[in-house]
Every structure is written in C-alpha cells, then in structure tokens.
Image: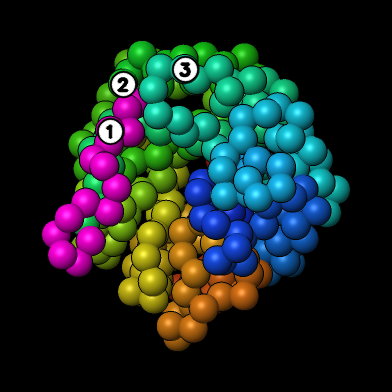
Amino acid sequence: MSHDKAILTCALTGVLTNPKQHPVPVTPEQMAAQARQAFDAGASIMHVHVRAQQEGMGHMPSWDPDVAQDVVDAIRQACPGVVINLTTGVIGKDISGPLACIRRVRPEIAACNAGSLNYLKLKEDGSWAWPPMVFDNPVAKVQQFLDVMQETGTHPEFECFDVGIVRSVTMYIKNGMLGPDMGRPEYNLVMGVASGMPCDARLLELLPEWMAPGAVWQTTLIGRQEIWPVHQKTADLGGMLRTGLEDTFYLPDGSRASGNGPLIEALARCARNARRGIASPAEARQMLGLKA
C-alpha cells in the first residue's frame, strides 16, 4: 500500500541507555522537552519507554503506572494532539507491569512484540557482549497483550525482528487475533539487531509481499550512519519512518546527535527526498485507522 505522506515516529529514549553517557531523557520534564523538539521537526507519534526516576537509576526501565502516566501527561501537554505509542517489551511470562501501564495510560498505539528472538551480540574478539538470552514472545503472550489492547482501544504495532516474524504476523491477522476495530495492520521492521534482520535495503523490496493486504509498514533501524540510506529506501518505497535516541546516536554525516530533534529533521528530509509530505497527527490517525 503506497502512501503520499510519511508518518514520522520518534523513539525518545529506549530501554537501558545510560543517561550519564548519552543525551537520553529520563524525567517527565526531559521526555516532554525532547518530544517537543521531535514534534516541531515533524514527528506525530512518540514511542515511549519509561525509566526509573530514583537518583542514579535512570538507566533502568520502570513499569510503574504512576511514572508512565506522569511521562505521558507531560508529553501530551508539550505536544498538543500527539499520538502516544507505549513500549511493552519484557522478558519472561510476567507481563503485569506493561499491562498495568497500558490500562493506566490507554495509549492510542502500543508495541506488540510479535515473535521470539535469540538476542545475541558479539565483541570484536568473538566473545559474547552479554550472556545469550531469548526475547520470548510466544503466541499466548502476544494474545495476552492483544486482549488488553482490545480492552483499552489501543492499536498494536507489530514489532518484527526477523523475516519469520513478519510471516507470523500475517498468520495472526488471518487467524483473527487482530480485532476489527484495532486499526489497520501495522508491521514494524526492526533491522540492525545483531541476531535479527540486518539493516539491508534489499529486504525492503521483498518483505511487503509477505504482509497482510492493506497493511502499513515502517522500519526501525538500529546502528550508526549506515542506517540512513535504508531510511531513504523506506521513504522511497512508501514505508513509514522512525528514528530517535533509542535507535541511533548518529546523524547521516556521522556526527553525534545532540538530541531527538536533529534526528527527526534528518528523517523528514528522507521523506521530502522521496517527494512525500509529512503526516500530521490527525493524518497519522486516519492512515493507521485509529479511533478519532
């Protein structure tokens, strides 16, 4: 499905990035300020991770619904009309934290991690960067998330880390797991995780063929300046665009980004290079089939 306009999503902060080493926002005030920069640059959707607010703990995630509410309220106040996209990713069977946050915040969109992945990374000497782990997202866990999203009127963005996960999402849709009032099917192609899909523009020619009819797709590209030609290819092929300090610290020229605003400015240039406009929040809602 081709789209004349591109939806820009800003991934504001991410999961574990240390704010002492990188310019990632942590407090509600910092999140709101970074969101406003991205909003002014054209982002209509903010992908929100919530961090622990205790002193010295800002590099750790939080699933406290009160903190989630404070962060989302601050972003909404700073960016009138913005669309909130809440993270949900957790390892293991206990998903009570993400579900509590969805129920409290009632975001218009939430991530729905759509399949399991061996989450691996090597150091240059061939040793593991961290102990090999599984990001487990079996179908029963996906269904639990979808049930609560149905309850709260939240649209699922299916996170696809590998080709088989893209095909699995198409099966979920055919099986009826995506409710008729949950919006248009949306695939997020996550590329650049070392043990997942590579950040390779050639895959973008193929993967839409394996998606449900009428689907919207976007790319989340993890890496340094090498991601930017793939962002451009996404824009050229009609995909939606996402970046932010969760995904990269580097601008197209290889310099380090001072915050989310410059990254979204660069993403907007990709859309314009493809002769596409930038979708407003209202247009993004319409394109995704969200409830007005």
Magenta stretch, residue numbers: 123-137
Which one is nearer the viewer's eye here, 33 or 51? 51
State if disc 2 and disc 1 touch (CB < 8 Å). no
Residue found farthest to the right:
77
Distance from disc 1 to disc 3, alpha carbons, whole Å, reads 15 Å
- Which circle marks residue 134 in the picture? 1
**162 falls in the magenta region:** no
State if disc 3 and disc 2 touch (CB < 8 Å). no
Image-based side of 38 in relation to 75, left or right? left
Residue at 85% of width from left, 48% of height from top?
77
Q: Mark 2 points at which residue?
A: 138
Above or below: residue 291 compared with residue 50: above
Say which quarter of the image contains residue 199: bottom left
Percent coordinates x, y for residue 68 in the rendering: 71, 35
Q: Which of marks 2 and 3 is in front?
A: 3
Q: Name the residue under label 3.
A: 94
Residue at 32% of width from left, 18% of height from top?
139
| Marked residue nearer the N-terminal end (2 or 3) | 3
